[in-house]
Image (spheres, coloured by chain):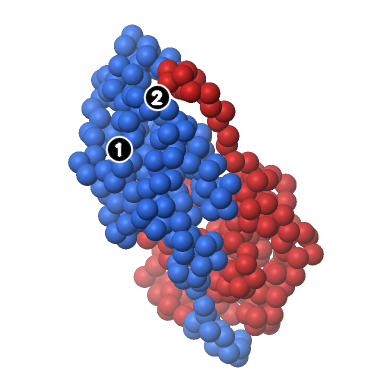
Chain colours: A blue, B red
Amino acid sequence: MTEQKATNVTWHEHKVTKDERSKLNGHKGAVLWFTGLSACGKSTIANAVDHRLSLAGKHSVVLDGDNIRMGLNKNLGFSAEDRAENIRRIGEVAKLFAHNANFTLTAFISPYRADRDAVRALLQPGEFIEILVDATVETCEQRDPKGLYKKARAGEIKNFTGISDPYEGPEKPELVLDSNNKGIEELTNEVIAYLEKNGYLNA
Amino acid sequence: MTEQKATNVTWHEHKVTKDERSKLNGHKGAVLWFTGLSACGKSTIANAVDHRLSLAGKHSVVLDGDNIRMGLNKNLGFSAEDRAENIRRIGEVAKLFAHNANFTLTAFISPYRADRDAVRALLQPGEFIEILVDATVETCEQRDPKGLYKKARAGEIKNFTGISDPYEGPEKPELVLDSNNKGIEELTNEVIAYLEKNGYLNA
C-alpha cells in the first residue's frame, strides 16, 4: 500500500479472497490427485470427471502429461530428483488453481509417497483428495496403449514405474478406484459422488 | 482412447475445449502481462484489476511475487539464467490459466525483452497483452516501499533492475500506463477499458 502515497490517491488494496472466488464460482476448490501406474486410466478418468463437472457448470482444469511435460516441466527428466521436482511444481500449480476455486485434476504416476505427501502439505485439510487408480501391472501391461511396457521389458526405457522403478501406493487415499474391474463411466460416477457427498460442489 | 478397450466400455473421451470453457465463464481468457521497474505499481494495479473483474463476475487470477517466488519458483534466484527460467515457468502457468478462460494478471519486473517475447510466443495472437507500467527510476526510488532501492544504492542488493541490472522496455506494448502521473484508480480504469474495447469481456 505504500506505493499509493506518492500519487496522493486514497486507495485500499483489496486482494480477492479464496472465499470470494468460491462464491463467484459457486463451489469450493480442491486438488483431485490421481495416482497410479502408467495406463491405469488416470488421465482418461480425470478428463471424464472434468467434462462432467464442466457440463454441470463447475470450474475445473486437468493437469497431465500433455500440458505439463511439454510446457512447464519440459526441462525435467525421469530421475528420482527430476520426478520430485516435477511433482513439486505440479503441486504448486494445482494449489494456485484450487485457491482460485477450481477443481484441479492432476493425472501423473507420481510414484513416490514423499512427493505426494509434500503436495498434501502445501494445501489446507480437505483441499487434497488423493485418488488411487488401482490396476495391477498385469492389467496395465495388457492395455499398454503406447507400447511403453513392451519397451520397458525390452530395456529400451529405463526407470519405468512398476517394471524397473518402484511405485509406492498411498497409505490413506481419500478414494480408491478399482480400474481392474470397473469401466470409466462407473469410476467417474464414484469421483463425482465423493465430491457431492463431501460438500465440495457448493460454495 | 486405447485404454478403454480392455474394459469393454464404449466411451468417447471428451477434452473440454478452450471455447467451451469460455462459454462457461462468459468471457475469453488472456494474459495481462504487467512489466516495469520495482515499485512502479505492477502488483497494486494487477490486484485492483483483479478485484474489479471479480466484482463484475469475471474470472481472473493474479500471479505475483507473493505466490510464485514463495512457491513454484522458490528454487530460483536472480541471475539472468534464473530470471529467464522464472519468467518461462510463469508464462507456462499463465497459459494454463488463460486457456482455462481466466484473465491471468502477472506482476513481475520481467526486465528482459527476449523472456517476455518467449511468453508471447507460447500464446495465440491476442492472448498476450503486454502492459508497460511506466515510471522513472526516480519515481520508483522516491516511493521505495520496501527500501530496496536504498539497499541497491548501498550495494547490499546485487543485480537490481534499474540500478545495477538493465530494464529492457517493450517495443510494442499493447498498453502503456503512466504511473508517474496517474493514480491507481485511473490506471485500473484504463486496463478495464482496453479489455472492453477489444472484446475480451464476452465469450
In the rendered view, tell whether residue B92 sits above or below residue A199: above
Q: Separation of disc 1 and disc 2 at Cα?
A: 16 Å
Q: Work out whether residue B115 or residue A171 is closer to the camera in this orientation and state it.
A: A171
Residue annotated with mark 1:
A176
Residue at the image point whose x is 43% and y is 74% from the top? B148
* Chain where mark 1 sits: A
In this picture, residue A138 sits left or right of residue B137: left
Do marks 1 and 2 both belong to one polypeptide chain? yes
Task: Indicate which disc residue A39 carries.
Answer: 2
For the residues bearing labels 1 and 2, Cβ distance under 8 angstroms:
no
In this picture, residue B192 sits left or right of residue B156: right
Residue at the image point whose x is 55% and y is 77% from the top? B140
Residue B92 appears in the rendering: no
Q: Quadrant of residue B172?
A: bottom right
Image location (x, y in percent) of residue A22? 48, 64
Image location (x, y in percent) of residue B178? 69, 75
Image location (x, y in percent) of residue A54? 56, 47
Q: Work out whether residue A90 or residue B7 is closer to the camera in this orientation and state it.
A: B7
Residue that lies at the very extreme toward the left in this rendered image: A171
In the rendered view, tell whether residue A170 sits above or below residue A201: above
Residue that lies at the very extreme toward the right in this rendered image: B197
Q: Work out whether residue B183 or residue B188 is closer to the camera in this orientation and state it.
A: B188
